Amino acid sequence: MKKWLIALIGIAVVVLSGYAFLSNGFSNIENIKVQTYDSSTDEYGEAKIITDEATLKKVTKFLNRANRETNVHYEMSRREDYKIAVYYENGMSDNFYAWNHPGLNVFLKWPAESGVLRVENKSHRTELLEILND
């Protein structure tokens, strides 16, 4: 009996620590503002505010499961496709600049963290682009 309890506690510790290390720490998103860049006018379109709870949960999942790189600097060959502002329930916010690389990933530059997120999972990438373009 004692061995089973120790094994169960060990498994719980591994699962919880795995979640903590594999998550990018996004939670409690209140709303998201998305603006699409129009290369013909060299301006951003009208802002779209996303407040739907189910959509916010999906975006949170995509951001938490994205591949993260820190302390990197990229020079992009073209302007971003989207400007995204994420607002949290505690009043804080994060800004992202997103590029769609068809067939590869959605590349999210995260200036506040000097890093990037790459949404590489095909279904996550497709759903995220549908949300951004909707």
Image (cartoon, rainbow, N blue to C red):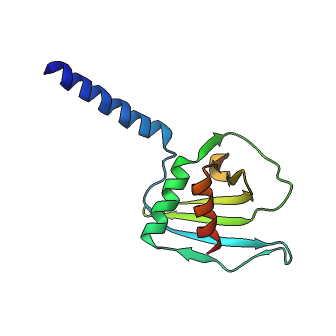
Residue drawn at x 64%, y 77% is 47
Give residue 101's position: percent from left, percent from top. 75, 55
Image quarter hosting the N terminus: top left
Between 57 and 76, the residue placed more toward the observer is 57
Give residue 86's position: percent from left, percent from top. 55, 63
In the image as oriented, which residue stretches furthest toward the bottom?
A: 46
Direction from residue 37 to residue 12 in the image, left or right: left
Between 2 and 73, the residue placed more toward the observer is 2
Residue 126 occupies quadrant: bottom right
Direction from residue 22 to residue 68 in the image, left or right: right
Q: Is residue 30 visible?
A: no
Residue drawn at x 58%, y 69% is 131
Q: How many marks?
A: 0
Residue drawn at x 48%, y 65% is 56
Direction from residue 33 to residue 1 in the image, left or right: left
Q: Is residue 78 above or below residue 73?
A: below
Q: Is residue 122 visible?
A: yes
Between 118 and 88, the residue placed more toward the observer is 118
Residue drawn at x 49%, y 39% is 22
